[in-house]
Amino acid sequence: MSEEQSLKQKTAKGLFWGGLSSSIQQLLGLIIGIIVTRMLSRADYGMIGMLAIFSSIASILQESGFIAALAIRTKVSDKDYNAVFWFSILCSTALYGLLYLSAPLIARYYSTPELIPLSRLAFLGFFISSFGIAPRAILFRNLRVKENAIISLTALVSSGIVSIILAANGFAYWGLAIQSIVYVAVVVLLNWYYAKWKPSFHIDFSPIKEMFGFSSKMLITNIFIAINNNLFSVLLGKYYSKQSVGDFSQANKWNNMGHSLITGMINGVAQPVLANVANDPQRQLAVFRKMLRFTAFISFPAMFGLSIVSKEFIVITITDKWIESAKMMQLLCIWGAFVPVNNLLSNLIVSRGRSSIFMFNTITLSLLQIITACISYPYGINIMIYLFAAINILWMFVWRFFVSKEIPLTLFAMLKDIAPYFLLSATLTTTAYYMTLGISNLYLSLIIKVVFVASIYALILWKMQSVIFLESIQFIRKKHKS
């Protein structure tokens, strides 16, 4: 088998397992989320939402970008993994101690004393996860997508069962905090099981110094991404109510579940595969454009579809007490359709080792988001979301500009790859939305929208003999036979 065929097979296999894993995860997450959300209040989710930014930044600091650094490293030894293992543990220990002492300050900022004990429990999650950084890097670098799928699904089921039991017994927001800790603990244990790697007590941090130039830029970048992703919860928690934070957290959760299905499928293979062909820009361009078409083919109909059924979905699954989150979800899902595309563009930049470009681009976007949010919050949550979505969608063209410096991807070529799927999805979902305006039965409205968009989308692509569509069908048939 040629190198090109081998890479193509690994990519297809990775996409299959990534897609299967993401699909099952989102389905299970949907079921668990519906059950738990029906039992908890908007304020319960608001309490956890207020702490999200601190846990996210702490997790990024203890990982420090070393998983990405190890993935693009030409040769990796046990010495490298061992250095990352001990560095992550030392870093997370110091961070947990700092956040433990800072809990009263966090509670004072939100004027919510209950956050002191809750934050000290919730922050244990990133400390536990530090023990799994090195084995996770091994699985990621070696495209062990199947094993990662098993790990994620096992952790999701285990933590989901725990959260349902706790919610049913009145643990409220404490159950959500414990759920995340159980999830992390299971992931860490299974990472060790599948990686088959053991650390050494001979500690040498020299590999950290070698990787720090790249990883430090990834670290700074990821911190700004975390700030950007959790900015709304921070501002809403300060200037609005716990219920508003809960509404936004709920809307953003379902939006994230939607676009994470696609990014989870792509992320498992994009960076390692693109890095594998980084020395051949023309070949990398061909691989990248195929990934871009596949991403657009999946993302636009899925996320636009989720946007138009947000009201039906929210009311049917978690009752009309969350109706405010349905309005937010509708707006967020339009932006969510572009997240996998932007994610793929940024992965290309990282695969080329251009962590500084990735860093400065992300920092600029985050600062723009922060300024916009701080200016717009007095005008209401919906205005903030409109501006947030518009900026992130338009930023796709900024990512494309920097990608074009690495591979010859023209603006016309990018639009040619994604525009057909965007226009078709936008037309069908808009038509379905107006078709069902007069239907009061939510179940009927949901079914008509989903069946209409899915069937017409597939029919048109089949009639047009879309290569991505036909290859996807062919691949699924082969897997079914095998």
Image (cartoon, grey):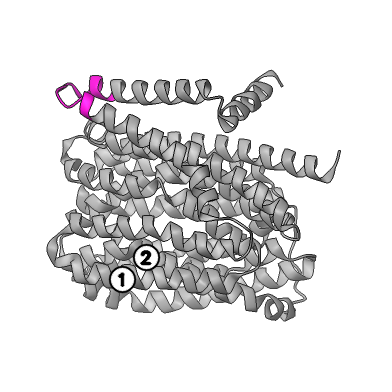
Residue 16 spot, x, y in % from top left = 62, 35
Q: In which quarter of the image is residue 445?
A: top left
Q: Are marks 1 and 2 in contact (CB under 8 Å)?
A: yes
**Distance (Cα) linking label 1 and label 2:** 7 Å
Q: Which residue is drawn at 55% across and 39% down?
A: 294
Q: What residue did someone put label 2 on?
A: 228
Question: What mark, if any, has residue 441 been given in the picture?
Answer: none
Query: Which residue is painted at 41% across and 44% down in the image?
Result: 257
Amino acid type assigned to the residue bearing label 2 in the image: Asn
Which quadrant of the figure contains the N terminus? top right
Q: Foreground: 260 or 202?
A: 260
Secondary structure under the numbered disc 1 in the rendered image = helix
The residue singled out by tag 1 in the image is 370
The C terminus is located in which quarter? top right
The kind of residue tagged 1 is Ile
Residue 145 placed where, x, y %?
Answer: 65, 44
Secondary element at tag 2: helix
